[in-house]
Amino acid sequence: MGEARKGAVMEAALDHLLVEKLSDPRTMEQLIRLLDRLENVTFLLDMLENFLRRGPEFADSINELIILLRQSLSRPEYVTRFEHALTALQRMQEFLDSPQVQELFKSDVLDVRSAQIIGKMLRSLHEASKEAAETETKRVGIIGLMRALSDPEMQPTLNFFLHFVRHLSKELNDA
């Protein structure tokens, strides 16, 4: 009879502890959140169960991939290619770490505006090269050159060129 009474007292204490824990507002809030997300929890458990069920299949796939990589890397041409790629990467890193390139990165030569100007110049150079190849070469004398210099389409380029030459002269004198 003493054992039954101890069991009943233990059960009552556990019930009281459970009721006390469940009546805590934080516990109630967490239970409500859990119940609201029960569908997600079920989905997650199903995914985990499916993953565990397919574990051997995943392991076999990974094992086959490792075998394939080992076979490929044992071929001399792949080893040579890998060595060449590694050497190229090391040389690129040495080049990028060189003081000259670091100085170039610090200068404003690589800013967006400079890149845009260089892009425009290269496009113009390309177009002029195509036009010169397509048309017949004709002589241009002093009068033709003077006429071309007064052409309104050429004025922005001439202005740019004169400023460029002036700044280049200053840079060369400062060097």
Image (spheres, helix red, strand yellow):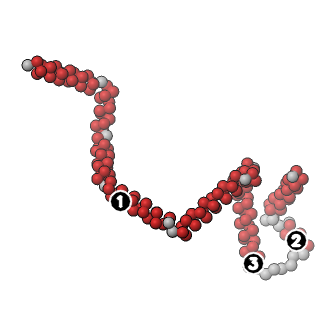
* Label at residue 60: 1
**Category of crowding for the residue at label 3, using alpha-carbon neighbours closer than 10 angstroms: few (below 14), some (14–19), many (at least 20):** few
Q: CA distance from mark 3 to mark 2?
A: 20 Å
Res 3 seen here:
yes
Quadrant in the rendering for residue 136: bottom right
Local SS, label 1:
helix
Q: Quadrant of the N terminus?
A: top left
Residue drawn at 75 percent across, 71 percent down:
128
Disc 3 on helix, strand or loop?
A: helix
> Dot 2 lies on which element?
helix
The part of the image, by quadrant, that contains residue 12 is: top left
Residue 64 versus residue 126: which sits nearer the camera? 64
Residue 113 in sight from this viewpoint: no
Residue type at mark 2 is Leu
Identified by mark 1, the residue type is Asp
Instruction: Please give the residue where the numbered disc 2 appears in the rendered image.
Output: 145
Q: Of the numbered discs in the image, which one, if any, rests on residue 133? A: 3
Q: Position of residue 6 (x, y in %)?
A: 15, 20
Q: Position of residue 156 (x, y in %)?
A: 80, 60
For marks 1 and 3, give the CA distance.
62 Å
Q: Earlier in the sequence, mark 1 or mark 2?
A: 1
Foreground: disc 3 or disc 2: 3
Asked if the residue under mark 3 is in contact with the one under mark 1, i.e. CB atoms within 8 Å, the reply is no
Q: Is residue 49 left or right of residue 87?
A: left
Q: Which sits earlier in the primary sequence, circle 1 or circle 3?
A: 1
**Relative horizontal placement of residue 154, taking residue 40 as reference (left or right):** right
Question: Which amino acid type is marked by label 3?
Answer: Ala
